[in-house]
Image (tube, rainbow, N blue to C red):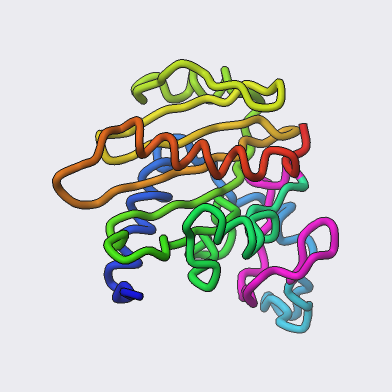
Amino acid sequence: MTRRTPMANSRIATLSLITLFALTACSTSNPSDSEDMETSGGTLSQNIAIRQTDDLGEPLPFETWHRKRWNSSNDGTSYEPCTAVTPSIASSLGLDPDSIADAATVDGQTLRGCEWHYAAEGMDNWSISQVVADYESLQYYKNRNESFDWMDDQHLNGRSIGVGSLNNGHCFSYVQSQDSGVMTAVNFSALPIPPLREICDRAIDLTRATIDQIPE
């Protein structure tokens, strides 16, 4: 199976995650995020264990060094993409389960979730991610992002799924979960670009596979 270089992985992660939310991300420099950090002489204590499980106690599929991976910008839902997308679900959608990686690149990042690579030969230019960020509703998110190319909403299990795009090689879905949005983004980073419908279908497929786990 073809493996991407670290440089290629970094480029794809930047395209599929940071670009999508750069215009709407809210600040994570909230004093409440640091309340659990003891101070001594103005220095943060390093003796506090870093959380390694989701809200249900399931361990993350990697060790995180980010003390504020969960923060006031992404704590509106108990849903955790990194544990919800099991190896079985990933494989059923053609993803490489072992390629799972934390979406957070810095501590206190707005986004909380994971990204994956596709397993099949010739899929090097495809990437997919599912992340959580706090927004009050689908309509609110649309109003904040009127410049996106919004398509007709989809409906899964009685829930409205927003579908939007930043460019011809990118598509994402949005489903409301409590006080957060769960966004599944697919990016294609080469030419020629496949039909946008194909890109969107991949995002919707992962949304469909996890919708039963996403609390309303």
The N terminus, quarter of image: bottom left
Q: Position of residue 69 (x, y in %)?
A: 64, 61
In the rendered view, would you say 154 is above or below 182? above
Query: How many marks overall?
Result: 0
Relative to 36, say whether 81 is above or below: above
Q: Is residue 65 above or below residue 154?
A: below
Q: What x and y, as percent, mark residue 8?
A: 28, 67
Q: Residue at the location (55% across, 32% down)?
A: 174
Residue 60 painted magenta:
yes
**Residue farthest to the left?**
192
Numbered range of the magenta stretch: 51-77
Quarter in which the C terminus is drawn: top right
Magenta segment's dominant SS is: loop
Q: Position of residue 34 (x, y in %)?
A: 71, 61
Residue at image point 55% right, 44% down = 206
What residue do we see at 52% from left, 25% from top?
162
